[in-house]
Image (tube, rainbow, N blue to C red):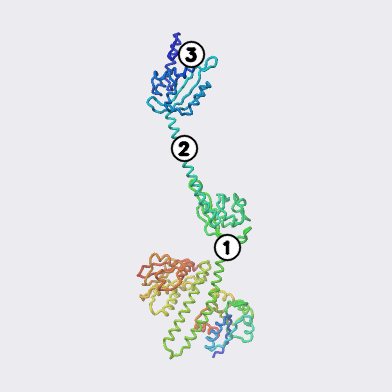
Amino acid sequence: MTNKTILICDDDEGILDMLEIVLEGNGYHIIPVQNSLNLYEVIDREHPDLLLLDLWMPVLSGDQVLRSLRKNPDTQDLPVIVISASRDGQQIAVNAGANDFMAKPFDVDFLLQKIQEYVN
Amino acid sequence: MDSLYNGSFNISNETSQEDFRLLLKALDASISGIILTDNRLQDNPIIYCNKAFEEISGYDRNEIIGHNCRFLQKEDRDQKERSFLRDAIRDGKSCVVDIRNYKKDGTLFYNELYMSPIKDDEGKVIYFIGVQNDVTKRKKVEQELRQQQEIMEKRVAERTKSLKESEDYLNSIVQTVRESLIVLDPEFKVLSVNDHFLKTFKVTSEDTLGKLLYDLGNGQWDISALKELLESILPTNNPVEEFEVEHDFPHIGKKLMLLNAHRIELEGQYKDRILIAIEDITDRREIERRKDDFLSIASHELKTPLTTIKGLVQVMQRMVPPEVNDKFKAILDKTGVYINRLNNLIAELLDVSRIQTGNIELHKEEFDFDKTVHETVEAIQVATKSHEIQIVGNTNERIKADESHIIQVINNLLSNAIKYSPDHKAIIVYLSRVSDFAKFSITDKGMGIKLEDQKKIFDRFFRVGDIQQRFPGMGIGLYICDQIIKNHGGSLLVESETGNGSTFSFTLPLNIITA
């Protein structure tokens, strides 16, 4: 067990389920967040080691979330990997201050490899 | 004139006798026939004729003298000229008629007859003098001329009718076409517009005709780039094609118009007019944009559950216990392959939509072309046991291009080569530098492509007929490849022979490194 905490923010329940299965199987502590509006509060409380963030979400989009995280001294260094099915996702993610980007659908092995780069 | 009596001369004075002979000779020398008739005698008979009259009529003097000159008309009595003559004789006036006469041998001749009365001191008509000319030739020419004229008039009428018909025909096309048309003179003044123009811009022909193009509306066409293009049409005959004008037009609001302009010429009449065709593409562009948005959203929504499925299948693959049979593992592997295929189809649909609307975005970055090709080929080779892909040569170039798009093209060409050569193991990739281009070629030994199909394979949704049955697909892969390569300033070509395999080659310009 690595005891690292990974926060996953995605409005799609299937993605949350799948990532939880994949990542818990690899020893991570997972906190799924389906509503991006709750994200700040969860980050405050849980102090995650990494955030996996979707882009297209209702009300508050991933890039909006990311921009405000980068403005806040407490969260500006939090590693964020954006995961999106949007073709322009990479550009949007980089512009908003993401550490990395993964296009949906992705290879599980590749995701695990990326996560390790940021949590260790 | 008392010396002239009953057709013989009785002259007493010697000198006047000399003069008289001279006068008679003169009369006989005339080429006009001359007669005298005596109005005082019964039936107004001819009492004198000269030589020329004998020649013209074909009669001898002794057959002429003493007869009324109507014998010249023979049976052809129903001539209106005869009544003119009768009236002139009755009224003692002179007249000129062209009358049909007949020679002794029956030959028709036209006689231009001048008749003039000779009156006594009391004004009573005693003689008529008739001067005749054979005008048959002139008449004939006149008649021919009249016939010619009639034929010409008939032809002109026919041509006018057919011109009118073809004008009506063309005009109905011009008025029916759903594109606004304007014709300009060399000074860019409007000569004519069609109905569709008036309807589209909600203007009247009075607002438009004779006005300068640049003054129409609120100077809506007064665009310097357009001006420059239009001004070069007449001197260079270079047409303006697909020029877009976005403008807030009076009466109709903000519209996007597509302009095409050509010099028009009518042989022998003018070659200094400009035809502008204007198409309102506002709605079309909006529909394209919505379709693009829709496809973006649809592909995003389709990819989301696909991501979940893919992740879960991969977890399953890792969780397979060692004692499970191979078939179970193979099923999981196949599921993974089809998930990837589904993902590619979704991506292609979005690509097609973007290419069509010109929204393909290139994120160009410099990369090592040879390395990318090797990595892409290796990734495919790992998953392909049926074929052996060999790479020959190298470019030794770094290029600036959208790497993911180039990989997409290479993947597409590789999978086509594999797909369409099921019975031949070897596939060769050639890399080379040609002039200032990097060149990639891929050769298979498969079924090849018929010549007539080679031109069409880059068309959207085109599938070779008999291929459709055996190899399913949407027919957009090569279309996307072609568009991607074109967008990079290169070209994609095919060389193939039925049964002898195919070679697909693309080039990428090296100078885009500095771009």
**Residue A50 percent location from the top left of the image:** 57, 84
Q: Residue at (50%, 53%) from the top-left corner?
A: B237
Q: Distance between the residues labelled 1 and 2?
A: 58 Å
Q: Mark 2 lies on which chain?
A: B
Residue type, mark 2 in image: Gln
Q: Pick whichever, B3 or B262, lies toward us.
A: B3
Numbered tag placed on residue B282 in the rendering? 1
Which residue is denoted by mark 3 in the rendering?
A: B1
Q: How far apart are marks 3 and 2 (CA)?
A: 49 Å
Q: For the residues carrying marks 3 and 2, which lies nearer the camera in this image?
A: 3
Badge 3 density bin: few <14, some 14–19, many ≥20, Cα 10 Å:
few
> The residue tagged with tag 1: helix, strand or loop?
helix
Query: Please, is residue B437 above or below residue B66 in the view?
Result: below
> The residue tagged with tag 2: helix, strand or loop?
helix
Lateral position of residue B185 relative to residue B492, left or right: right
Q: Are marks 1 and 3 in contact (CB under 8 Å)?
A: no
Lateral position of residue B396 relative to residue B299, left or right: left
Query: Please, is residue B8 above or below residue B239 in the view?
Result: above
Residue type, mark 1 in image: Thr
Q: Which chain carries label 3?
A: B
Q: Quadrant of residue B465?
A: bottom left
Which residue is denoted by mark 2 in the rendering?
A: B149
Badge 2 density bin: few <14, some 14–19, many ≥20, Cα 10 Å:
few
- Using the rendered image, report if marks 3 and 2 lie on a common chain: yes
Q: Distance between the residues labelled 1 and 3?
A: 104 Å
**Residue B214 percent location from the top left of the image:** 60, 54
